[in-house]
Image (tube, rainbow, N blue to C red):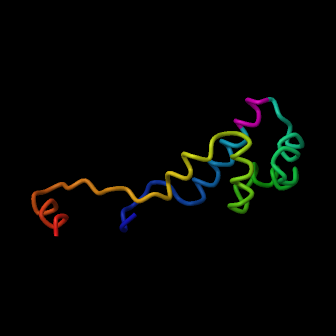
């Protein structure tokens, strides 16, 4: 993020992701056990994640794959092209 100040902490994002998983699970009317069976992530781990936001990345991806598409998450790994703000930026990008 190039040292920019963020209004959100990593913990805030963890809790938001946990809440998103919980909401999507409930929208599908799935119990934690159902999600566990479909994802391969133990129900106890899902419960812990939904209450604390703590989970391994792999387990998060397994859950998300059952509840939503992975493609938007994959997009986060791609380098974004910088948009020049000044003529100096344009000239520096050419060289």
Which residue occupies 37% across, 68% down? 3
Q: Quadrant of residue 4?
A: bottom left
Q: Classify 86 as above or below 24.
A: below
Q: Position of residue 50 (x, y in %)?
A: 75, 48
In the image shown, does 13 or 32 lie closer to the viewer?
32
Which residue occupies 76% across, 30% down? 28
In the image shown, does 81 or 13 lie closer to the viewer?
81
Q: Quadrant of residue 66?
A: top right
Q: Classify 88 as above or below 76.
A: below
Report the side of 90 relative to 40 (left or right): left
Identify the magenta region.
Answer: 23-28
Count the labels in the image. Answer: 0
Specify whether residue 91 is painted magenta: no
Which residue occupies 85% across, 47% down? 36
Q: Quadrant of residue 6?
A: bottom left
Q: Position of residue 18 (x, y in %)?
A: 69, 48
């Amino acid at each position: 993020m190039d040292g920019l100040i963020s209004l959100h902490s990593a913990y805030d994002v963890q809790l938001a992701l946990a809440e998103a998983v919980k909401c999507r699970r409930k929208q599908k009317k799935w119990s934690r056990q159902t999600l566990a069976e479909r994802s391969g992530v133990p129900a106890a781990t899902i419960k812990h994640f939904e209450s604390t936001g703590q989970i391994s990345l792999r387990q998060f991806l397994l859950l998300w794959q059952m509840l939503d598409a992975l493609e938007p998450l994959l997009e986060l790994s791609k380098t974004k092209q910088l948009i020049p703000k000044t003529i100096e930026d344009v000239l520096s990008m050419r060289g």
